[in-house]
Image (cartoon, grey):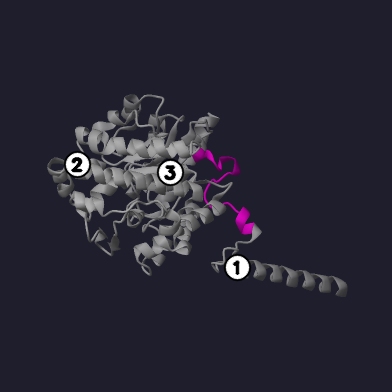
Amino acid sequence: WSCLMTQLAMTMSLLCALACGALGAVSPAGRGAPVRSRAAMTRPLGPRMSVADHDILLRVARGEEADRTPVWLMRQAGRYMKAFREISTKYPFRQRSETPDLAIELSLQPWKAFGMDGVIMFSDILTPLPGMGIEFDILPGKGPRIADPIRSMDDVRRCTPLDDPDSSHPFIAEILSSLRGETEGKCTLLGFVGAPWTLAAYSVEGKASKNCEVTKRMMYEAPGALEALLEHVTAGVVEYASYQVRSGAQVIQVFDSWGQYLSPDQFVRFAKPFAERVVVELKARHPEVPVIYFAHGSGGYLDLQRDIPADVLSLDWRVDMAAARDTLGKGVKVAGNIDPLVLFADEETIRAEVRACIDKAGRAGHILNLGHGILQGTPEENVAAFVDEAKQYSHSKVSA
């Protein structure tokens, strides 16, 4: 009995030592963050995660078949999460997005909580602008501000090429390479860029705009200057997107967030050709990396997007998914497109909307998402229900 008690005491001491060591270890990157124990690393990070599904988003984006519909959400790392707000109240936006420790933690929060099939880097579409000679800041409660907006050809000439992102944006490489290490073999890692039209319009307006009035006047009064700015921004976006891929991103989403300001003719002249160049040049450098194109508010010219050479077209929530499938044709892969405000409904409504969207899209060539970003105030449990239903329903359809 004495020997047995001694053996038990030694075993308990060893277990305590191992636990303390696991919790107190410092990460190899030297960030000072605890390294997760082996048990924590193998524990599922969210609802219904499966090793077999680890690259399902990547495979579907490439056009491969899968057993279910993959799911992630635009702006999934955001202020609707309590854990996110605990950080966002302490640090201003650019500090959060440009400090690797903070950006990495914020990027991983929703994936760990809800088990989406993708992690998207926490950042902003305006992040590359300083590397192009266009400085910006994000003011609390007011949003982005560009102190010296681009209003003339002389302003365009003072811009600088983004030709060395390693020097201008070294934090991006650290963020993405660390995220790739965290997600490898578990889910798909997404990077993103703003489309040339959206970044150029922001650079002209200098801030968020209800009507994009200054830029649209520039279309008519100085179209050459606007097109020169678009050329400049396009070259920078290609370089920045390629840098993200080299740093670890497996999929790139191109956000044309200001697409709603364009008529069909304006889209054809000032947005589409430049977005196409980003896709074509990025695919030429990285043919294995799928590109998703999302033009917010673009339902009025959906047919004009059919031949954009992106791997996936992400759809705004204002478009009926079944009608969009008919317009685009069966060969075009799509993402989306549930109204973000559905996430404020009761759980059964959320689950019903998920099922309806998957049914309308069909199982092949569809990535479930919202039709825009998650809104502040969205209940976290509703995001959990959204992701869970996507995985449950997809599996049940396959089983049936």
Distance Cα–Cα, label 2 vs label 3 = 29 Å
Which of pointers 1 and 3 lies earlier in the amino acid sequence?
1
Identify residue for label 2. 224
The reply to whether dot 2 and dot 1 touch (C-beta < 8 Å) is: no
Camera-side mark, 2 or 3:
2
Identify residue for label 1. 26
Helix, strand or loop at disc 2?
A: helix
Q: Residue at x 49, y 53 (%)?
A: 176
Q: Position of residue 12 (x, y in %)?
A: 74, 70
Q: Please say if 46 is above or below 389.
A: below
Near mark 2 (Cα within 10 A), the count class, few <14, some 14-19 or many ≥20, is some
Q: Amino acid at mark 2?
A: Gly
Q: Nearer the viewer, residue 5 or 11?
A: 11
Q: Residue at x 65, y 66 (%)?
A: 22
Near mark 1 (Cα within 10 A), the count class, few <14, some 14-19 or many ≥20, is some
Q: Position of residue 93 (x, y in %)?
A: 35, 62
Q: Amino acid at mark 1?
A: Val
Q: Amino acid at mark 3?
A: Ile
Q: Please say if 278 is above or below 120.
A: above
Q: Please say if 159 is above or below 93.
A: above
Helix, strand or loop at disc 1?
A: loop
Let me know if residue 157 is in the magenta part: no
Identify residue for label 3. 252
- Residue 90 in view in this figure: yes
Q: Residue at x 60, y 54 (%)?
A: 43
Q: Which residues are magenta?
A: 39-58
Which of pointers 2 and 3 lies earlier in the amino acid sequence?
2
Residue 25 in which image quadrant: bottom right
Residue 262 in which image quadrant: top left
Q: Nearer the viewer, residue 40 or 142?
A: 142
Let me know if residue 43 is in the magenta part: yes
